[in-house]
Image: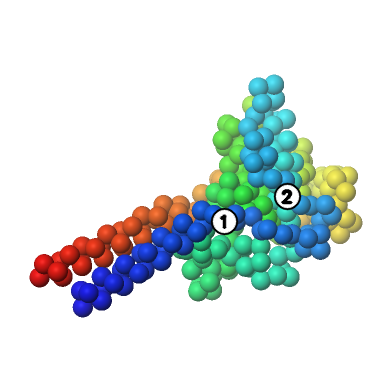
Amino acid sequence: MKTFLSVFLFVFGFSLLTVNLYGLTQDIRPAKITDEDLRFVNDHALPFERVMSQLNMKSDETDIEFAYRATTLISKGLAHIHWERFQPEKFNQLVPIWENYFLYLMGKFTTIPEFNRYHFADYQRSLQRGIGICGDASMILSQVLNNNGIDNTILTYPGHVLVEASFSSKQRVLLDADFGVAIPFEKEVTGNHYQSIAQLYTDKGYTEGDRLFFEKMFQSEYQVWEGVKHFITKKYYFEKVSYALKWPLPLVLLFLSIVLYRNKKQA
């Protein structure tokens, strides 16, 4: 029995270690996204390194200027695919096994939709994958603003997610990093200005259908979340733990297999 268990642990641990090592050679950003895959025209994501290099406040930049720039930059750092048309494996929405076998197994063998089409809590992994929707963009922006000392909250409206940022000037604005639109109003008054807010999206080149959607949305109720940990609490911590364990687990399994094998020989 000890021999079987030792062999099992060795094979299992070695397999996981091999998967992890293979993952070091892979890029989680989809290799090919065509124009037909995209929701918006000319919406291919900027390179990850280019986006990351610009996500810090410059010495000659105010906090408001940086927040507006980051909103635009993040929107360009994510491609908006027609995700509903494709299987989740196509654009790595299902986290590949070589990226994180815990997240892969949760997405592949459970019925939890959040894992089947996964949204990373870690903003760098999200930008590295280079695809996303409003929730991804808002979680990225919220963490980037935090990193640069700008208070913010995440807002969920029916069908959309935004960030409200609070600045040193006491001004508060809404930031839509999904569409790259900055809205110079506080959340409490958006219902009074829904038409002018929707016009901001039209001015950015979005469609009449988008304008009508935002007119309706900004007349709706919203919910406030105190950052990413509050927004996706359980998944946030699960992701942290899964990445913390992905390397130690196979090493522990290999170590246990060796211990069992030696004990068997000495018995």
Please, what secondary structure does the residue beneath circle 1 have?
Answer: loop
Q: Does 39 sit left or right of 122 as displayed?
A: right
What's the amino acid at mark 2? Answer: Ala
Q: Residue at x 41, y 52 (%)?
A: 244
Instruction: Quickly name the residue at label 2.
Output: 45
Q: Residue at x 11, y 67 (%)?
A: 266
The quarter of the rendered structure image containing the N terminus is bottom left
Name the spot of residue 90 as percent of width and height, x first. 66, 66
**Would residue 152 be seen by someone viewing this image from the given angle?**
no
Q: CA distance from mark 1 to mark 2?
A: 18 Å
Q: Residues within 10 Å of mark 2 (few under 14, many from 20)?
A: many
Mark found first going from the N terminus, 1 or 2: 1
Q: Does 5 sit left or right of 125 as displayed?
A: left
71 vs 159, nearest the viewer: 71
Q: Residue at x 76, y 49 (%)?
A: 179
- Up the image or down, 66 lies above or below 195; here it is above
Q: Residue at x 53, y 72 (%)?
A: 108
Residues tagged 1 and 2 counted as in contact (Cβ below 8 A): no
Name the spot of residue 7 as percent of width and height, x first. 29, 72
Number of numbered tags placed on the structure image: 2
Please, what secondary structure does the residue beneath circle 2 have?
Answer: loop
What's the amino acid at mark 1? Answer: Gln
Instruction: Quickly name the residue at label 1.
Output: 26
Name the spot of residue 73 as percent of width and height, x first. 72, 41
78 vs 193, nearest the viewer: 78
154 vs 110, nearest the viewer: 110
**Would residue 24 be seen by someone viewing this image from the given angle?**
yes
